[in-house]
Image (cartoon, rainbow, N blue to C red):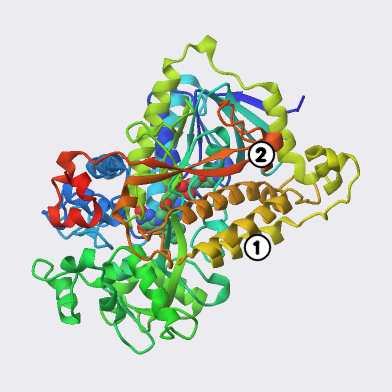
Amino acid sequence: MTNVERHAYDVVVVGAGGAGLRAAIEARERGMRTAVICKSLFGKAHTVMAEGGIAASMGNVNPHDNWQVHFRDTMRGGKFLNYWRMAELHAKEAPDRVWELETWGALFDRTPDGKISQRNFGGHEYPRLAHVGDRTGLELIRTLQQKVVSLQQEDFAETGDYESRLKVLQECTVTRILKSGQEVAGVFGYVRESGRLFVIDAPAVVLATGGIGKSFKVTSNSWEYTGDGHALALLAGAPLINMEFIQFHPTGMVWPPSVKGILVTESVRGDGGVLRNSDGKRFMFDYIPDVFKEKYAQTEEEADGWYTDPEHHRRPPELLPRDEVARAINSEVKAGRGTPHGGVFLDVSTRLTPEEIKRRLPSMHHQFKELADVDITAEPMEVGPTCHYMMGGVDVAPDTAEARGVPGLYAAGEVAGGMHGSNRLGGNSLSDLLVFGRRAGLSAARYAAALDPAARPVADQAEIDAAAREALRPFNGPEQAASQDTPEGAAGGAQAPAENPYTVHQELQQVMNDLVGIIRRGPEMEQALERLASLRERAGRAVVEGHRQFNPGWHLAIDLRNMLLVSECVAKAALERTESRGGHTRDDYPEMDRTWRKVGLLCTLTGPGAQAGAGAGADADSAADARVSVERRPMDPIRADLLDLFERDELLKYLTDEELG
Ligand code: FAD
């Protein structure tokens, strides 16, 4: 029997970014004993990096804005593949969540008449992003953490213990969701600093672990984004939806090499930045797709006029949704019209004064000065696409955030799928975190409260032992790993060599970047799947040296399981979807196909490691043998009153005649 620390809570939230903290606050406010676990330091979640703002139709800058316009923009951005009910809830509830943040102490930038200021962003018809300079995520996290502390102070006043109802466990990584039969029973993980193993018994678990960017070589994402929540859900028996849709943000830094991929916020374009190729041409006018032609300016004069008189001009094409801009930049560079370091130029210095740039875009000014020795108040930046955001994720029920098929499991934030369809609009993530973080916390609390305390699901000891063996496997030599895994290994067959987890990770990133990246082709993705199978086998032989106290090699060896599973989902779903839509572009199927709009792709685990159908989740001892399978699922028809918000001509571009009746 494995020696593990054991604690019990009503609700466990895995992840302390915007979604996790908002879920935890809600669960605690509903009276549940709640634990929040994060693998980084508390306050260091990815949300802190968010720059541009939170999208919410408060109408502070343009009174024409309202939830219906926001809903329309979100559906258009997602090319109508969004879970429409999520897009509806999101558009309706986002303003309340922003105002709520202010009551908790957030201080957004203001309009001259003292309202929360809102800025333009790609794909949003009106200025809609509430912001704090270009450091909005920092203010969001600071405010949510402050709320956590204030709740803990309330608890102290009542119980004498700050952590009696809301406990934060930082630098702890969850490696398994534990189940009893079909139901969630808790989580298993390790403490990064000490290497100690722990179990938290809880009937309700909220996944809020963020994205998957570290599977790609060029990414804006931080080290934590290894697809853990996606893999944890999959291994627990919960399907993932539409994993082929990955957002490549059009503007990442391209130089110097050490910072390649770091984000250049869309606010630069929202505040007037223009894109030019090496010939000095403002090329985005050549890339306005038919579906957006009526909404975007056709000439530079018209586009420039929009900044001062938006009522009488159409938007500049630099503010098309991200997928369109990223593909355009990719095409310009491929056509030989790129910058010296393989990007295009982004210039805001001709539109704003140096003082305005430093006030509105302080982080960008600092970032370029420090990292590339470029002064963006006087010269253009060089930028190119970078892997940024995962639209696919845990398949959740829109109203409750409950993961389908696994009672007690919930997901919110970037780890959850559906909300953004095939492409997310900038600013819609921070609002998504708050809207669905709250809903997930509420649903988890209700679920836990409704259970008979004496009959809560309890994780089986054998499952805990298997999770411990899996977590510690990288410390075994390849012989032991082989003898645990296969009878042949025990019989003393030729041993394959031990692998270095860093090498396997680098190769994985290269495969995903080169073969399942921004432009995809069938044969390349088949090749990627072969390479992934080989990498998975090698990852099973990853061995680490040293001890369990803060051992990054060990942590990576564990994360590799997640990145490989998620990458397989991405590649298989991308191969299956024979069309181009949003964040999924097929060179061999370049058109968007209306019949595909009706299809969602669900990834599940099958094979010996998955125990599919038994409902017990993947067995930790044989998880490496489990395989991803993809099946098609019809998308729910969009409710008629929501369709009425669009012109029929526009709907015809997305929906089949049959759907339109
Ligand atoms: P995160 O904030 O990433 O939190 C994930 C949490 O899960 C972390 O606490 C992590 O430690 C924890 N975790 C992960 N795995 C485990 C595990 N196995 N065990 C325990 N804990 C785990 N969106 C906008 O809407 N507006 C913007 O302006 C914007 N700007 C951005 C700028 C940058 C540079 C980037 C990279 C993204 C930006 N985004 C923006 C996107 C947005 O920031 C993210 O989508 C969002 O913050 C994700 O929040 P989350 O709560 O889902 O996850």
Q: Nearer the viewer, residue 117 or 488?
A: 488
Which mark is in front, 1 or 2?
2
How many marks can you see?
2
At numbered mark 1, what does the secondary structure look like: helix, strand or loop? Answer: helix
The answer to whether marks 1 and 2 mark residues whose Cβ atoms lie closer than 8 Å is no
Rendering coords of residue 176 (x, y %): 61, 35
**Residue occupying the far right of the picture:** 492
Which quarter of the figure has residue 259? bottom right
Cα distance between the residues tagged 1 and 2: 22 Å
Within-10-Å neighbours for mark 2: few <14, some 14–19, many 20+? many
Whichever of callouts 1 and 2 sits on the residue coming sooner in the sequence is 1
- Asked which quadrant contains residue 590, the reply is bottom left
| Badge 1 residue CB within 8 Å of ligand 1 | no
* x and y, in percent, of residue 366 in the image: 44, 71
Of residues 571 and 512, the one drawn nearer to the viewer in this rendering: 571
Residue assigned mark 2? 623
The residue at the far bottom in this view is 279
In the structure shown, which secondary structural element does the residue marked by tag 2 occupy?
Answer: helix
Callout 2, which amino acid? Ala
421 horizontally vs 244: left or right: left
Asked whether the viewer can see residue 106, the reply is no
Seen in the picture, residue 335 relative to 110 is either above or below; the reply is: below
The residue under label 1 is 506
Q: Position of residue 174 (x, y in %)?
A: 60, 38
Image: 631 above or below 60: above
Q: Residues within 10 Å of mark 1 (few under 14, many from 20)?
A: some
Q: Is residue 653 left or right of residue 615?
A: left
Name the residue furthest front.
658
Q: Pick the quarter of the image with the C terminus.
A: top left
